[in-house]
Image (cartoon, rainbow, N blue to C red):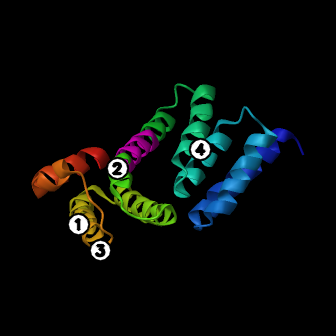
Amino acid sequence: STPEKKALLNSNLSLVLKNMGEMEAARQHAQAATEADASYVKGFWRLGQALQALHRSEEALEALSKAKALDPSNKALMKEFKKVEKKQKAWKLLMDLILPTINQPEKNKKVIENALKDVIYSIFNLQDQDKHVAVREFINHLYTIRKNLYVRLPRVIIELSDATIIKFFMYLIG
């Protein structure tokens, strides 16, 4: 079998596995597709999707950048890239705001970071009509974290009204 056929087979397996919820296996097959044929756009695209589903946005952006370089006129690919890029920027902004304020041992920061990451990615993946409710819940979780884990959120965030915070998060995930 040719490298092109191997790439196609692995890319299609990646898609099926992703749809079955087997993200790590999907990532492995997408990786195999890119290794079989480094010019196969869908291999890198599927790799980016699998990495994003695994909350590995930086690696996802790298894979999607390679796909974009191979097919710069693909509008659906550009849309996917911009979506992942926006998530990554929002995640970094959130972590830059919250992590420095956590008064916890370093090992607990990673646990908290992963929990917050799960919440943020869950919000990103909701339908638009559900995002407002999810953001409200996320803000409540921030207050709970602050109370229960001795997190000192920056004073500017504490003093903002809920409506302003919601608008800010809606902008990030919009």
Name the residue rendered at 11%, 53% in the picture.
159
Q: Which residues are magenta?
A: 83-95
Answer with left or right where residue 79 lies relative to residue 63: left
Answer with left or right where residue 114 lies relative to residue 51: left
Q: Nearer the viewer, residue 171 or 41?
A: 171
Between circles 3 and 1, the one closer to the viewer is: 3
Is residue 85 a member of the stretch shown in magenta?
A: yes
Question: How far across and how far down the image is residue 169, in percent?
Answer: 25, 50
Amino acid type for the residue under numbered disc 2: Leu
Task: Give the Cα separation between the discs numbered 4 and 3.
Answer: 33 Å
Question: How far across and how far down the image is residue 149, in percent?
Answer: 33, 70
* Picture disc at residue 148: 3
Question: How far across and how far down the image is residue 133, in percent?
Answer: 22, 65
Amino acid type for the residue under numbered disc 3: Asn
Residue 163, quarter of the rendered image:
bottom left
Name the residue rendered at 81%, 47% in the picture.
6
Please report whichever mark, 4 or 3, sits nearer to the chain's N-terminal start.
4
Query: Is disc 1 in contact with disc 2, using a CB cutoff of under 8 Å?
Result: no
Between circles 3 and 2, the one closer to the viewer is: 3
Q: Is residue 85 visible?
A: yes
* Picture disc at residue 59: 4
Label 2 crowd bin: few (<14), some (14–19), many (20+), radius 10 Å: some
Q: Secondary structure at mark 1?
A: helix
